Image: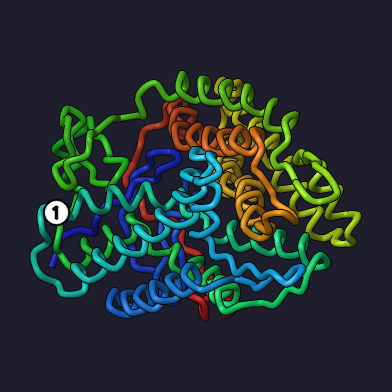
Amino acid sequence: MRASRPLIVCTHCDTVHERVPVPGAGLARCVRCDTELYRHSRFSPREWQALVLAVFILFLIANLFPVVYLSMAGKTVSPTFPKALLLIWQQGYWGLSVMAGLVGFWLPLFQLIFQFWALGLIAREKPLPGDFGIGLRVLSHLEHWSMTAVLFLGLIVAIVKFAGIGHLTVAPGLYAFFALTFLLTGLSRITAARLWRWAEDRELVPVATRQVLSAHPDWSACTHCGFVQASQNTRCHRCAAPVHKRKPNSRRRVTALVLTACVFYIPANVLPVMELRSIMGTSAHTILGGVIQLWQLGSWDLALIVFIASIVVPITKLLALVVLLVGRRWRGNGVQRQRNRIYDMVELIGQWSMLDVFVVVLMAALANFPGLSQIIPGAGALSFGMVVVLTMLAALSYDPRQGWDQDTDEEQTIEPQTKLSSPASQATS
């Protein structure tokens, strides 16, 4: 048994805590900035692994089976998401196909594979292979870029736009996507940080304790695995990742990415995101034009969702990142906590702006009736996708700990506050 509890470092303010057990479906928060540190799970790694396997099978069903059957003038299309990606690739829109394919198919697939692999290694409670740290580093990056929930909402929007044009029948793929969205949301709890904690509890990896801080007053926490070690280390002793006290050149990188996103935001809204070709003629549609079309079709709820995801969210992200950049001189714990909330909001809403990109890709597959109607992606779609990617990279490059560095209070190793969840949330943990 260990003499002391393992250490955990808050990723938002760099305060060191001793990791204490939390009962039931409880969670622990940082006593300095109130950021959630970790949650307790009543499921074992083996049980989570079984769920990952079931979700993997469901993922294949959702992507290999048609989502709908659409008939028009004696012709029928039965699109799948991979078929939609292949179609726009053949139309010459390679960048859009690669972008949508990565965040909608490949990265969620690899996330499931890495989760299954890591959970299996931890569940067997045997010495971990040398590439375990590399695998979890990859998983920590995949967590930010898997957008199956956004893809499902894009499916709903695309189907609503075509519901009155032809005879439309829901296919098994759409039901699978519906279930997949909820199950993947649950699996989002299987983060690299949680896997490292499980490995620590089973004594499969080195653990930093209070004695480490006594031996190394000038310490750094690995941003990939959280291991506390001497600041002079260039590589983490546990996962071999580069060790930095703070993210290098964080402010410059965020500034460059935000300015570039602002440049792409102009053509994203001015240029058409798609072009409709039919026997009635050709018409081009911008992002705002798509919102208006949904409203005219009577789907005011979806019009509002698309308006928020495609117009409000990108502007909010850009303004929030600017506030985080220019407000670095504001001091006080209360101010820094508000900045942390702004940062968490930017990370939370970041991926939902990809909705319009998915809608364009899926509508191209639904309207693929040569001679009757076709939808061709426009230049605005790729520009808008670049805005989403750049703002997400800017959020990932931002280091919230820098604002707390202005507080010169002596850091201590303390136990985090614990908060018990309500019975409703306990049932879903």
Give the total number of marks visible in the rendering. 1
Is 59 on the left-hand or right-hand side of 309? left
Task: Give the percent coordinates (x, y) of residue 302.
Answer: 78, 59
Is 355 on the left-hand or right-hand side of 397? right
- What residue is shown with label 1? 206
Kind of residue at disc 1? Pro
Label 1 CA crowd tier, 10 Å (few <14, some 14–19, many 20+)? few
Task: Give the percent coordinates (x, y) of residue 412.
Answer: 34, 41
Q: Residue visible at 56% across and 72% down?
A: 66
Is 402 on the left-hand or right-hand side of 153? left
Considering depth in this image, is 409 or 279 the residue closer to the camera? 279
Quadrant the N terminus occupies = bottom left
Q: Residue visible at 80% across and 42% down?
A: 282
Is 118 on the left-hand or right-hand side of 377? left
**Residue 229, relative to residue 424: is it above or below?**
above
Q: Secondary structure at mark 1?
A: loop
Considering depth in this image, is 13 or 153 the residue closer to the camera? 153
Task: Give the percent coordinates (x, y) of residue 403.
Answer: 49, 29
Q: Residue visible at 75% across and 41% down?
A: 287
**Residue 121, relative to residue 410: is it above or below?**
below
Q: Is residue 13 visible?
A: yes
Q: Is residue 43 visible?
A: no
